[in-house]
Image (spheres, coloured by chain):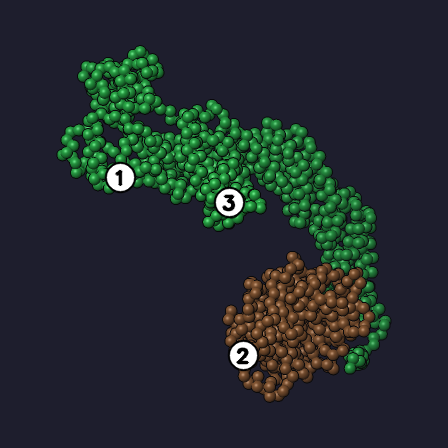
Chain colours: A brown, B green
Amino acid sequence: MYTPTTTSTRGRVRLNVGGRVFETTSATLASAGRDTMLGAMVDASWNSGVHDDPAEYFIDRDPCCFAVLLDLLRTGDLHVPPGLPEATLYREALYYGLLGRVRSARLGDFDPDRLRLASSVHGRSPGDGVAIRAAPDGGCCVSHGGASGVVRVYNWMLQERRPVYHPAHAPVNDAAYLDASTLLLAARERPGRRDDDGGVSSFSALTGETRHRFRVAHDRQPRSFTATALAFDGGCDVFASCKGRINEYGVAVWDCNTGEQADFFYEPPGCALGEADRLQWLEETNTLMVATMFPRTDSSFVTLLDFREKSVVWSWSDVGTPASIEDKHAVDAVAMEDGRSLCVVNQYDDLGFLDLRKNASGVRWRSRSKLAMSDGKTKKAACGEEACYPKLAAHGGRLFASTGDAISVFSGADHVMTSTLRCSNGGAICDFSIGGDRLFALHGEENVFDVWETPPPPII
Amino acid sequence: MSGGGPTRKRNFKIEAFKHRVELDPKYAERTWKVLEHAIHEIYNHNASGLSFEELYRSAYNMVLHKYGEKLYDGLQNTMTSRLKEISKSIETAQGGLFLEELNARWMDHNKALQMIRDILMYMDRTYVPTAHRTPVHELGLNLWRDHIIHSPMIHSRLLDTLLDLIDRERMGEVINRGLMRSITKMLMDLGPAVYQDDFEKPFLEVSASFYSGESQEFIECCDCGNYLKKAERRLNEEMERVSHYLDAGSEAKITSVVEKEMIANHMHRLVHMENSGLVNMLVDDKYEDLGRMYALFRRVPDGLSTIRDVMTSYLRETGKQLVTDPERLKDPVEFVQRLLNEKDKHDKIISVAFGNDKTFQNALNSSFEFFINLNNRSPEFISLYVDDKLRKGLKGATEEDVEVILDKVMMLFRYLQEKDVFEKYYKQHLAKRLLSGKTVSDDAERSMIVKLKTECGYQFTSKLEGMFTDMKTSQDTMQDFYAKKSEELGDGPTLDVHILTTGSWPTQPSPPCNLPTEILTVCEKFRSYYLGTHNGRRLTWQTNMGTADIKATFGKGQKHELNVSTYQMCVLMLFNNADGLTYKDIERDTEIPASDLKRCLQSLACVKGKNVLRKEPMSKDISEDDTFYFNDKFTSKLVKVKIGTVVAQKESEPEKQETRQRVEEDRKPQIEAAIVRIMKSRRVLDHNSIVAEVTKQLQARFLPNPVVIKKRIESLIEREFLERDKVDRKLYRYLA
């Protein structure tokens, strides 16, 4: 049997990686893309004078990791054999320019009903975490309370980067990722400091360097102010709820590229804008939701602002609600992604809904729709833990609510509970965030956060 | 606690430091030399001897060992020096070879840049983002921009060459479009700002002055149609140019230059151009030219409104001539037909040339509304046109044709402000058609009524529909009458009665004349039959209407059947007993009102071929001293002779006045009703608001005159429906 060698070896490539020989095709290597080391290596522009058949290359790298990566290129599947440290694999992937591929093979598309606990990361900060934010690329940052004003930043490999400090270590109230490499922080001003303390700044998430300080000027003089919550729109505007020393309460707007102040929306009577707990940009209606909740204030306020007309387009408050109804207070609010309704939660974990298309409507509380199981509640009471108020998030058409040490997922138009995520150590969840195909849950104690991921779907 | 963070940070650094092996500084220098050599070899097209893997690893090692900055700066310097050399070789290229050399060098640079980027990929991924440097590819483009495109020896030469080539192409030469395409693409690759500042902006300026000159030249020597053709061609050429070798973003800009220079700046001159402007195009139905004008003008601000304004004023002017020309008023049917033709003509222009533009349709409609109402006889004429069509015009026409014509008439009807006047006339004409049995098609009649009903509502047509009902019941009643009373009646004359409900029909009360005894008997029998079956009703004979068929025998025994009106019948019957009668005799015996009698006698005695009576003395007009004789010598080829009444189809002046009068009378209660309706709901209102609301409520039927409204308000105050406010005299209050 003679097979013409020309056809059998066409496109074949022999690689000697650190002494181990691999045979593959140039098509497999080219599939990595022209902007990767392997893709460039087999590209015609680097092989004009070479006519070996099969082509041979020597690569001075570790063969075990290469085997994993070649397997990834062949199958699209990332299989890491036991004993191979992830960090080593990531390092090698970076050498070949395949880190992006590894990431997307590692993290399946976010599916709230198939989440698995991927890891728990213990922090090293002295204070407890107060807020966690997911980065668009799968990394995250954890803001720590206390006087340090430090924000720990993790890349998607959960390796800790250089931490970010707000100028002069002002305590951080809220954080937001403008994009994978830009972090916004809102900080508190401290009494007795110079003017121009606290406020909002943007940082490089990669290096921790300050990019811009977003200043609020009154009478052309930059003033100290406390920023309590942050948001940004699809364009280039950054919003922050601001409280100045001389009653400058309201929402400030900046251009995120230049750092210039673009607008200031003063708090009208009957609305609480200056010390909000949550700002949320509603793309559907081009409005900004400002939610100021109990217990920061005695009553809860939710307001929708339209900056094009500089007007309040919708508002709700539980001021004047009869106190007899078990002293319930909305403690968090989130607008659903369609921009048509708003979900609130009270300190007893009841969910309620408001219609954003009608003004002056009341909350439709879901009758006794306990998020947590009854045992969760009794446990909380029994252990006498410091209670964490529930938090809400809307993502991919689902509603998420943290209650005690668990996060519940609600699906469909009627918000039926479809999943519960719980990791027992670390105590109650004080904050959680979804982004970059991951869900991060920060525990109120122990300085630990959980990372939930969707595994790649089964092949058949 | 606040010190915890920084301490840890320091620890971290030390920890990492321990693993690093400090490298021999010469190693970095040596490695860079290898890479620098490779970069030169790549530019020299000599890359086949290079090992990619080795170079990649070298660059990796430099970055890994913190020599990223050295690597980056080295790259920048090496590339800069290479580009300076390239710049010199491009500068020395002669004439036409300049662009080709530039393009070839650009291709080389691109390829080299790609390969350099391949080698330095690791640096691009790790060092560049953290050190905030420009990525390698972008760096290569920026250096090309700064050292080649912006080099003083190349910059203006490149621009001049490009603009010169484009100018030559505009003059009809063939140029190398592929090369142009590559060069403009290069400028785009260097960044939209480079393309815009270094090429597009000057290109637009040069184009503007080119087209400003050319349009001036064209407008002096071309007529409007030809000018538009040239402008269109130029516009298409520019769009084609963009699609072939400019960036797509330039299309809107260059077309707006052409639009401004060739169209917007000459818009008014074009539209009003003598002998070939818009009005001439409209007159001559030049669909193609009009379509072109529309397509071009819509591209510029105020373009369409310019066309529309000229078209509107032309329409109003011609329309006004049409409706006020006394010649045209002589024939109402022709008058309406002309309006319809005019409408058809412009409808077609709008649909063919103006793409059924709604604003043009509105302009057409408002123009028609404007001039149709200039002539207050338009409602009458339109009704007459319908009358003509439903009488005879539609004979042989299919149902669809009828519908088409009626729809067109309805269109004109919509323009009328005085719809109630139309209703008055329509009622009269319909009554005549129905009573004389002249309607061609019952379906067509009803279809017209339905159209009026959908347009104006039930109220508008209820009386018209009542007339149809009367006709039907009359028929049934007559059948019943003859079925029950046939023996009683014997051989007397046959009677056919139309029982008309008072109020539904446009009857003028006129004293009944004396009917011949033969007829009177039958009439009395019918009266007793009818009143016997219907209690509490009153029958009045309308002898001014109706027809009669009578048999007459003339000299030589010639027999004819005469179809005459009731009055004529009464007159003729007198001659059964007398050969000659004076006017006075006839008037006394029949008691027909003088004006009707004169008309009636005129038609019996003075119309050639139908003169069954002879008048002495012979003359055209009837005077009270005339004597009439039975015309024994009357002959006719026909057995049946229809003797018409001499009657103007169109209303005479006094009749017109009378109709007007009646319309005005009818409007009064309608206006009052509207005022009361409004005041009942609003209680207090000022004068101007009332006038506005009344006008709004009634405009479907007619346009009330404010003076009349004021009179009605005064009358209502007198009758204590309203009162004036005691303080503000302009306010009215409703009195419940």
Q: What amino acid is at disc 3?
A: Glu
Above or below — where is A214 with respect to A460? Answer: above
Q: Position of residue A105 (x, y in %)?
A: 62, 72
Query: What distance separates the C-alpha of mark 3 from that of mark 1?
Result: 42 Å
Q: Residue at x 20, y 26 (%)?
A: B517
Mark nearer the viewer, 2 or 1: 1
| Residue neighbourhood size for the residue with mark 1, other residues' Cα within 10 Å, grouped as few (<14), some (14–19), many (≥20) | few
Q: Which mark is residue B537?
A: 1
| Element on which disc 3 rests | strand
Residue, disc 3: B723
Q: Position of residue A377 (x, y in %)?
A: 57, 84
Q: Position of residue B388 (x, y in %)?
A: 37, 30
Q: Are marks 3 and 1 in contact (CB under 8 Å)?
A: no
Q: What amino acid is at disc 2?
A: Lys
Chain letter for the residue marked with disc 1 in the picture: B
| Element on which disc 2 rests | loop
Q: Which mark is residue A268?
A: none
Q: Are marks 2 and 1 in contact (CB under 8 Å)?
A: no
| Direction bottom: furthest residue | A382
Q: Quadrant of residue B28?
A: bottom right
Q: Residue at x 67, y 29 (%)?
A: B220
Residue, disc 2: A370
Query: What distance separates the C-alpha of mark 2 from that of mark 1?
Result: 83 Å
Q: Residue at x 70, y 51 (%)?
A: B185
Q: Could you confirm whether marks 2 and 1 are on the same chain?
A: no
Q: Is residue B333 left or right of residue B208?
A: left
Quadrant the N terminus of chain A occupies: bottom right
Q: What amino acid is at disc 1?
A: Arg
Res. B443 visible in picture: no
Nearer to me, B437 or A51? B437
| Residue neighbourhood size for the residue with mark 2, other residues' Cα within 10 Å, grouped as few (<14), some (14–19), many (≥20) | some
Chain letter for the residue marked with disc 3 in the picture: B
